[in-house]
Amino acid sequence: DISSDLLVDDIRALDPAGQVGLIQGREAFISWAQKQPYQDDVILVMGARDPTLPVFARDIARAVIVN
């Protein structure tokens, strides 16, 4: 099994000076994402066997896209 915590630990081990973090929960992520400045950035939503990911991706897009 792989978890978000393990993935973050592995990324930190590869690049200790890099910026990597873990936000627990979808609503917390959307709240965080709304506060970030974006310019030509990409938010990649990935997962396995979670049929709700397309809905989550749309919720993120609605939260961060400025009309």
Image (cartoon, rainbow, N blue to C red):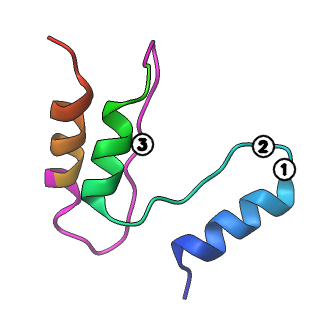
Closest to the observer, 16 or 57:
16
Amino acid type shown at disc 1: Asp
Instruction: Report x, y in % for residue 22.
Output: 53, 60
Q: Is residue 41 magenta?
A: yes
Amino acid type shown at disc 3: Leu
Residue ID at (37%, 49%): 45
Q: Looking at the image, is mark 2 or mark 3 nearer the viewer?
A: 2
Q: Which mark is residue 15?
A: 1
Q: Which residue is mark 2?
A: 18
Q: Residues within 10 Å of mark 3 (few under 14, many from 20)?
A: few
Image quarter (top left, top right, bottom left or bottom right) of the N terminus: bottom right
Closest to the observer, 35 or 59:
35
Circles 1 and 2 in contact, beta carbons < 8 Å: yes
Q: CA distance from mark 2 to mark 3?
A: 18 Å
Specify the segment rendered in magenta.
Answer: 38-55
Circles 2 and 3 in contact, beta carbons < 8 Å: no
Left or right placement of residue 43 versus residue 63 in this view: right
Q: Is residue 27 above or below residue 7?
A: above
Q: Residues within 10 Å of mark 1 (few under 14, many from 20)?
A: few
Residue ID at (41%, 66%): 24
Residue ID at (42%, 42%): 44
